[in-house]
Amino acid sequence: MMISRLAVSILLLFALRGAGGAAAQERAESPVPASSTQMLLVLSDTPDAPFGMLRRFERGPGGGAWRALGDAIPVVLGRNGLGIGIGLHDIEPGTVPEKREGDGKSPAGVFRLSSVFGFAPPDEAGYRGIPYVRVAADLECVDDVDSEYYNRIVRRGAVTEVDWASSERMRAVGAAYETGIVVDHNTDAPQRGRGSCIFLHNWTGPQDTTAGCTAMAPTDLTAIARWIRSDRDPVLVQLTEAMYARYRQDWGLPVVSATEE
């Protein structure tokens, strides 16, 4: 059967539209899970900025528009700003370097928030919707890249062999770890040397930067820790302003007004 040139042109046009639609759908795929209905959004001015602002958002089950909760709060980041971390996202390499162990950078990207830790006994802590771990004297987060337990929180007395030469003894850190939220950065089959022991925790002051975590006023952190719930699949989205402008629409992130600053 003969096909006219017009018919061929129409078929080609629909084929191109279909390809374009598929590409658009691929670009629009968000690293924020559809199951996530709680979000912490941290934005910094530049990759090297050690300070940022945190906003809370929530949405209904099954997706939909994000709704802001409360006011933006100040946070401190790693002393050297942000580096691309390992989480739910796929960020193209560019002006922001990859996060590395000991680089003094907080991870940029999208990460689940899996548990809370603190000094208080579980029955006094008040964290009902998410797993809670009490920080005892033997609780450590291993940052030795050669250890089998790299980037894991363990109790020293519970392991068969202490094979690490370096770790954070979490109780000894003091007030900064009196309350904390575990950020799932580089947790699934950890890549050695890409960063470990990333938390949201109390700051010791609004000018005191961290070694790679994100810190804030204790009252703000406690409110957030009591707000997040595992059944709402909470995530941390941490980006520079430029990265946010690039990915906001494709990732379905909430609109942030500059007037809020």
Image (cartoon, rainbow, N blue to C red):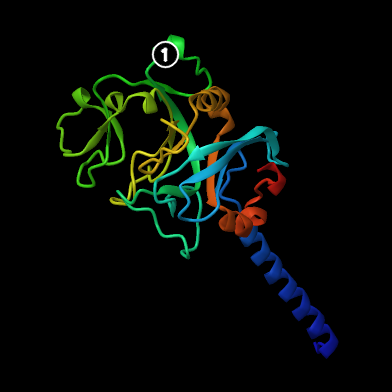
Q: In which quarter of the image is the N terminus?
A: bottom right
Q: Can residue 217 be seen in this view?
A: yes
Q: Which residue is drawn at 77% across and 78% down?
A: 13
**Side (left or right) of 208 relative to 57:** left
Q: Can residue 4 be seen in this view?
A: no
Which residue is at the far top? 123
The residue positioned 48% from the left and 56% from the top of the image is: 47
x and y, in percent, of residue 174 in the image: 33, 24
- 5 vs 138, nearest the viewer: 138
Q: How many labels does the image show?
A: 1
Find residue 207 and report its image quarter: top left
Left or right? Give the position of 48 relative to 100. right
- Quarter of the image holding residue 22? bottom right
Residue shown at 20%/46% (left/top)? 146
Residue 74: x percent and y percent? 55, 37
Q: Name the residue under label 1.
A: 122
Task: Name which residue type carries label 1.
Answer: Pro
Measured from the top left, where is residue 60 in percent x and y?
Answer: 70, 34
3 and 12: which is toward the camera: 12
* Label 1 packing within 10 angstroms: few (<14), some (14-19), many (20+): some
| Quadrant position of the C terminus in the picture | top right
Which of the pair 12/34 is nearer the observer?
Answer: 34
| Residue 95 percent across, percent down from the top left | 47, 64
Q: Is mark 1 on a helix, strand or loop?
A: helix
Q: Which residue is drawn at 33% across and 53% down?
A: 100
